[in-house]
Amino acid sequence: MTGRLDGKVALISGAGSVGPGWGNGRAMAVRFAEEGARIFAVDREPERLLETVTRIEALGGDVETHFADVTDTAAVAGMVAACVKRFGRIDVLVNNVGGSASGGPVEMSEEVWDAQIDSNLKSVFLACKHVLPVMEKQGGGGSIVNIASASGIRWTGSAQVAYAATKAGVIQLSRVVAIQYAGKNIRVNSVVPGQLHTPMVEYRLAGQRTGGDVGKILEQRQSRIPLPFMGDGRDTANAALYLASDEARFVTGTEIIVDGGMTVRSG
């Protein structure tokens, strides 16, 4: 039985995780490997990739790690060149780097705003800038999957103006690039995750928002979700897998929302 990504090379940024479990990047890297993709796993910190690599190797998958700051254009160019040197091509690009910071325009410093723009939006711009010429040169098309957030399309419980603005920007960047490159058969889409239970909730958000009380923040997040459970990175991975695969050959310039119905609930 063949996998849905057999023979494809997937470059995934943010392929590690801040802790054990299914973060979006780790889940996508492992899920893609399960479907036959060769994985070029990128993260800024080596230790975050250890579990990702272990899980892929346990499957008998082919994975190469690379460490880079994807807000730096030289680093991104080097990342892309390293992937092509190792695997010869790039068929799938997944942009999964970013994070949130609390505050509205008055409370948030310019430094935090600028850092959010760089990590959440500029990183997507730079990866597309350097990967698109590779996909064009290869011929045969390609798929770019950008990870946005429900915060880019609705209020999600707290003021995080830069995160919301940048994730909205990721969605619109994806739409514009999708149309620009449609004639090259390069598809560009976004996955829009909602309130998932990922390691980031326990290792970062609980400390920022509920004084370290993980149970409390999970309860708050679940209260916004119509379905009776909270998804995790594997749900993001399955949506991204569809968009990366040839099953989505006629899908471009759009979004898959993965949020248990949260964005259609009023209030």
Image (cartoon, grey):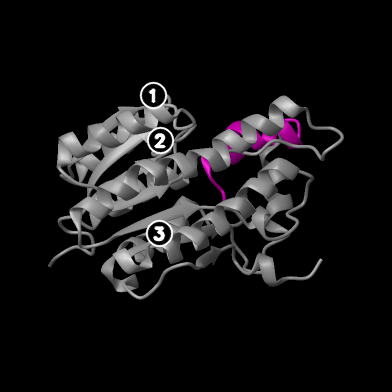
Residue 163 position within the rendered picture, expressed as x and y whole percent measured from the top left: 67, 43
Residue 218 position within the rendered picture, expressed as x and y whole percent measured from the top left: 67, 48
- The quarter holding residue 78 reads top left
Residue ID for mark 3: 240
**What element does badge 1 sit on?**
helix
Q: Residue at x 57, y 41 (%)?
A: 120
**What element does badge 2 sit on?**
loop
Q: Which amino acid is tagged 1?
A: Glu
Is residue 266 depicted above or below 14 in this figure? below
Q: Mark 2 and 1 residues: CB-CB less than 8 Å, in contact? A: yes
Q: Which amino acid is tagged 3?
A: Ala
Q: Which residues are magenta?
A: 195-212
Q: Which amino acid is tagged 2?
A: Gly
Residue ID for mark 1: 47
Closer to the camera in the image, 208 or 13? 13
Q: Residue at x 34, y 71 (%)?
A: 248
**What element does badge 3 sit on?**
helix
